[in-house]
Amino acid sequence: MKSQVKKILAITLYCLPVIFFLVCYFLLTTSGEDIHQGAHTSVNIFGDAISAFNHSGRISDMYAWAIINLFDYQFSWGIDLIFRLLDVLMAAAIFYFIVRIALGRRPRIDIKDGAMFCLSFLLVIATQHGRVLYAGWSAIHNYLLIGLLPLIFSWLYFEKRKLPAIVMIFVGIIAGMSSNLVAIGLISSAVIFSLVYRKKVKIEKWQIAGIVGVLIGLIIMYGLGPGLNSYTENTEYITEYDYLAFSDILANPIQGVGTLLNHVILNFGRVVLPLLVVFIPTLIYILVAKIKHLKLPKWTRPEIMRGVAILTFIVTYLLALTQLRAPTRVLLPGYLAGVILAIMAISHYLKSRQVFLALGIALILLSGMIITMRLYLAIDYLKKSGNILAEIQSSSESSLCVPQEAVRSKTFPVLYLGQEDMLADWAMPELIYGKEIYFCE
């Protein structure tokens, strides 16, 4: 009977994050950016994908732009049902691969692994980093792939079984094109890791092929695509992100270095939480073990190497971002890598079944609370925005105004958990149901 209860608890821990994303993705109203990019417009998947490639060169934007015109303003029993389910699957896959990389094996249906899955979910969703995975379709469709593709590459890279080189080249290209700077982090960390551990670890040919694939992806983005031109040619980006081009650094080295150092401090500060989650429990555990003269468990060499490689990625990725004061969403890949380190350390040092049982119950309560809060906000805004959409659709006017407050979404003071507003100031006036919409003065 006890084993059955534990199995039910473990399954619950796996299911709760999935329920959260089901609530988010099926009760989400399109935001101002989604509408501006083409939600509820004529389908032009190939054309939109090409436009996105010319805009940023990354696969995540190509996916986001190509499928948004398949989405209605709110959930409908159309083709967007398939993509909403696919989004849920990708969101769950992010946390599955976090746990799989951290544990070095396939997660099992037990309380420990289920707790690590749910904990990784909470470590992301309970922070500002997690907002991009549930607040608006434009960010969701981008950062699902920006988060997932490097994780899949890392999982395959750390797998013990050999893979055909051509497979790893293809996976590397896809991972390299997931985002403008992820490829730089992956390549840099792989090179540094290989140089440091070349005498201790044999780097397989298929692993080298994977890095070659990432390099090809980077060349495609910066050679055939625009690379970072969307930053360098956009004055709004330069102002908002304090973007610093290399030419500016060369022209004024002292000021340039000062700006870079300021960016380093700000960017690293935003991902310090998962690193603290790793180091503080580990240091406490080691201190207590030393005082009580306990024999400390030794990590195996693969665990140490994996941890060093992931930590190296965090550092090199953040250093690649020092050209700009990175917004929280851009830091997601580095933050996810930090969560892997946290799960790796916690699962290794916490051995007691009673501890994981207590942790599992606490995680169920916390996740249940977050789901309830998100459900309340989603239903409230679904009704509120639905009334405005119905009013627009039934109107005989070719243009009409809506009060700003009528399309503002609610949130909570500590946990954000809300969604983006249906209409954005910068995109107004906007076309909805073929009618020009503007804010009432």
Image (spheres, rainbow, N blue to C red):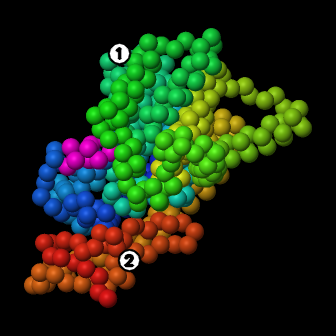
**Percent coordinates x, y for residue 220 in the rendering:** 31, 32
Which dot, 1 or 2, sits closer to the camera?
2
Left or right relative to 5: residue 292:
right
Furthest toward the left, the residue is 396
| Mark nearer the N terminus (1 vs 2) | 1
- Asked if residue 107 can be seen in this view, the reply is no
Q: Which residue is mark 1?
A: 164
In terms of secondary structure, where does tag 2 sit?
loop
Query: Main structural element of the magenta stretch: helix, strand or loop?
Result: helix
Q: In percent of the image, x 40 and y 58: which residue is there?
A: 235
CB under 8 Å between callouts 1 and 2?
A: no
| Quadrant of the image occupied by residue 122 | bottom right
Q: Which residues are magenta?
A: 48-57
Query: Residue 178: x percent and y percent?
Result: 37, 39
> Magenta stretch: residue 247 in it?
no
Report how far apart the C-alphas of labels 1 and 2 lie in the structure. 51 Å
Query: Which residue is label 2 attached to?
Result: 408
